[in-house]
Amino acid sequence: MELRHLRYFVAVGEEQHYGRAAQRLRVAQPALSRQIQDLEQEIGFKLFDRLRRGVKISSAGKLFLDDARQILQQVNEATTRARRVARGQLGTLRVGFTENASWHGVVPDSFRQFRERYPDAELQLNPLTSLEQLEAVRSGRLDAGFIYNMPRADRELDQVGVGWHKIALAAPKGHPLSKLRKLRLRDMVDASFVWFPRRESPAFYDSLMNECFRGGLKNPRIVQEAVNEATIMSLVSHGMGVGFVNGTARWRCPESVVILLVEDLKMPLPLALVWRRDNGSLLLARFVADVRLLPDVRTLSKRGS
């Protein structure tokens, strides 16, 4: 039994007439009649009672007609779903991101745009550190990730720069440092710091320490360690000290905290969308193409050219 047998049967069953069914299917009537006879012979019972004018579907044929319609509908739906996957309109896209990059700009804009353009696709979002994302992209557990300080040369991975963020200082409102017209690193020698442990990001930790040393903050007074930026912000809000955070913290800053720019802290944080070169997902290709067209990314590309 082939699908065309079911299509021919459904057409005859609905029209109750071979001639009209043949016109509907755009096939010759004798060929249609032979296909129905072949089908009846295969299943072992009559589907139609032949009349002088047209045909009448049998009792068994009525039951078979309902099932045949469902089968054809399921086949059509399966074909449609597969076609949409092939066109990059359906499927699952797994994207990682750092929490501090998700409050404003390219990252949330890209997620919102994807859901608007591909409502039937599944977008799985995974908040992870940059190192965790990098490992997940390499292993195939993520299709892509928004990663800070991604090395340029990598044979396995491709990337597109999506932004540059700055490091700022979070301080309790009313803190003496918040009253300075221009805040510099050397102004913080007496401040108490909430700092992240080196094990969380050794390269970034060392770079920040070197930058502080260069600016005159040679031995920061660290009174408390916090494993992530949210905890740093929380402790700063309770007056435990000041802490270095991503400048994007201003988008989710507690009322009791101010975000201060540091004039001589020159440590820009490049943010890039990263994916495996051999990932053949059409959804991923569409996502990357759409990210490239976001206004902030286009502006960044123009500046870099």
Image: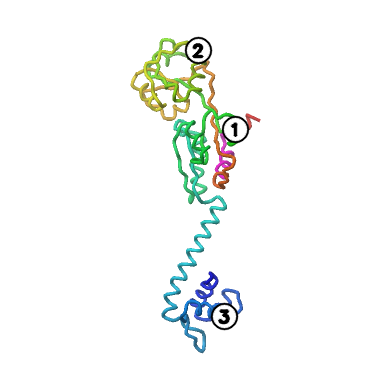
* Mark 3 nearby-residue class (10 Å; few <14, some 14–19, many ≥20): few
- What is the distance, in whole Å, between disc 1 and disc 3 at their CAs? 63 Å
* Mark 2 nearby-residue class (10 Å; few <14, some 14–19, many ≥20): some
Query: Which residue, given by chain and number where applicable, does mark 1 sit on?
Result: 154
- What is the distance, in whole Å, between disc 2 and disc 1 at their CAs? 31 Å
Circle 2: residue type: Phe
Nearer the observer: mark 2 or 3; the answer is 3
Asked if 195 appears above or below 137 in the picture, the reply is above
Asked if 212 appears above or below 61 in the picture, the reply is above
Circle 1: residue type: Asp
- What is the distance, in whole Å, between disc 2 and disc 3 at their CAs? 90 Å
Q: Toward the viewer: 95 or 247?
A: 95
* Mark 1 nearby-residue class (10 Å; few <14, some 14–19, many ≥20): few
Asked if 141 appears above or below 305 in the picture, the reply is below
- Quadrant of res 171: top left
Asked if 147 appears above or below 241 in the picture, the reply is below
Tell me the residue at 40%/15% (across/down): 222
Lower position in the chain sequence, tag 2 or tag 3? 3
Query: Which residue, given by chain and number where applicable, does mark 2 sit on?
Result: 213
Query: Which residue, given by chain and number where applicable, does mark 3 sit on?
Result: 34
What range is drawn magenta here? 286-297
Tell me the residue at 54%/23% (across/down): 268
Lower position in the chain sequence, tag 2 or tag 1? 1
